[in-house]
Image (cartoon, rainbow, N blue to C red):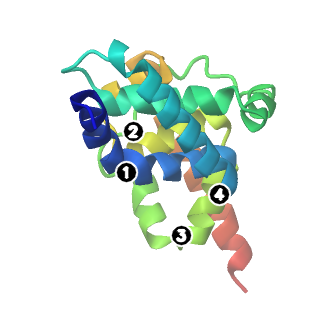
Amino acid sequence: MSDFHKEFEKLTVPLLDSMYNFACWLSGDADEAKDLVQEAVVKALKGFGSFNTGTNFRAWIFRILRNTFLTSKTGLERRNTVQEDEEGFEGAVASGDTPELALIRQADSKLVQEAIGKLSASFQEVLLLVDIEEMKYQEVAETLSIPIGTVMSRLARARKQVRIILCKLLAQRRP
């Protein structure tokens, strides 16, 4: 195995589980997620020569994964759905330990997954990358090719929507 392939493997293997989890959330299907990760890794290997050593590999490969999803049948279907208007929310920012996060910690994971599943794709992506994959805002901005301010506003709105959805779902559970 060449040094080129060894370096690629060293950088990629630790991210495979995170990539699979993100692909599952994006596609909603475990088999499609496996295919997406496999296709993204092949594309990343082919393009690894253009990767700038010292830059953020995780953001680079997640961008490839996301773009692979967006060009898939499922991704094209989701992109053609109407996204919620984000105007007027540029300054909305949720910080550290929010009430939303406290509520998420208390709710069971099935309800949280259901609530996240009800978000628009643009909100889901940001929420998953920040709160589940623990990416920094800058990494998310690089991965999604959006300004960092958009990351923060989408995250704030996504967390707020998850809180509202969870409250409704929990209220439905009460006798």
Q: Earlier in the sequence, mark 2 or mark 4?
A: 4
Crowding at dot 4, Cα within 10 Å, few <14 / some 14-19 / many 20+, comes out as some
Tell me the residue at 70%/78% (across/down): 173
Residue 72 falls left or right of residue 7: right
Mark 4 falls on what kind of element? helix
Marks 2,3: beta carbons within 8 A: no
Residue 133 image position (x, y, % from top left): 39, 47
Residue type, mark 4 in image: Ala
The residue beneath circle 1 is 98
SS at mark 2?
Answer: loop
Dot 2 amino acid type? Ala
Residue 79 falls left or right of residue 53 = right
Could you say which disc has been placed on residue 30 in the image?
Answer: 4
Q: Are marks 3 and 4 in contact (CB under 8 Å)?
A: no
Judged from the image, the secondary structure of the residue bearing numbered disc 3 is helix
Q: How much space separates mark 3 and mark 4, taking CA atoms?
A: 17 Å
Label 2 close to label 1 by CB (< 8 Å): yes
The residue pinned by badge 3 equals 109
Of tags 4 and 1, the one toward the viewer is 4
**Mark 1 falls on what kind of element?**
loop
Image coords of residue 9 (percent x, y): 31, 41
Q: Mark 2 sits on what residue? A: 94
Q: Amino acid at mark 1?
A: Thr
Q: CA distance from mark 1 to mark 3?
A: 18 Å
